[in-house]
Amino acid sequence: MVALQFWTGVVLGAAAGGMLFSRVSTAHARVAFSDCVVVSNIRGYPTLTFRMVNERPFSCMLDAKCSVSALVKDPVVGMRILAPCKLERSTNMMFRVLWNVMHKIDEDSPISGLTEENVEEKLLALVVQIEGTDQTYMQTVFSNKCYYPSDFVLTITSLTLWQRHHAKLGLT
């Protein structure tokens, strides 16, 4: 009788511990986004670029999909529209460490004609979402970020980035 009680207690304790662990240990996406969005000339076209970093490099995100939409003011209707931006590469089979996301600004882009003078009036926000499967837990994870017009660097040189970085650190 004592042996039966002992083994029942061991099995129930193991089951309760397993259920508690599975409840507590859920997958979370830890993706860091760059502080600014850079618009520079790549292959002859103005291209919007930002970076994402997987902060869990030993556990990659499988079949990652990135979508970027621009929240713009439509001058004809006078309303805000969330227009999708076509990316150079919107999927990444194994997002392990770094992903450079690029959107070519051409005549079909919702942010075509964006300049330093009209960025505040034309663009309200750039909404980024990434979705993928966590390699360790095999669960779908999400992460997102909003960039506002103050986060855009439109006339970019390496000196501009260096100055922004040092100003953020409090150095001059």
Image (cartoon, grey):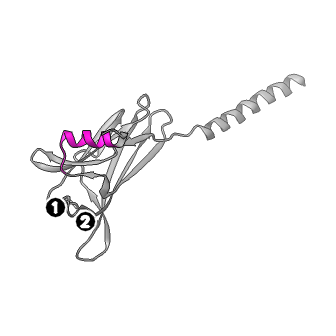
- Residue 152, image x and y in percent? 27, 52
- Residue 132, image x and y in percent? 40, 43
At a point 76% along the width and 33% down the height, the residue shown is 12
Q: What residue range appears in magenta?
A: 155-167
- Residue 51, image x and y in percent? 30, 42
Residue extending furthest toward the bottom: 77
At a point 31% along the width and 74% down the height, the residue shown is 79
- The quadrant in which the N terminus is found is top right
Query: Is 97 positioned to the left or the right of 16 in the image?
Result: left
At a point 32% along the width and 70% down the height, the residue shown is 80
| Image-quadrant location for residue 107 | bottom left
Query: Is 87 positioned to the left or the right of 141 in the image?
Result: left
- The quadrant in which the C terminus is found is top left
* Residue 133 lies in the magenta-colored region: no
Q: Give the amino acid at mark 2.
A: Lys
Q: Nearer the viewer, residue 5 or 115?
A: 115
Name the secondary structure under disc 1: loop
Reading the image, the residue beneath label 2 is 122
Q: Give the amino acid at mark 1.
A: Gly
Task: Name above or below for residue 151 compared with residue 71.
Answer: above
Q: Are marks 2 and 1 in contact (CB under 8 Å)?
A: yes
The disc at residue 113 is 1
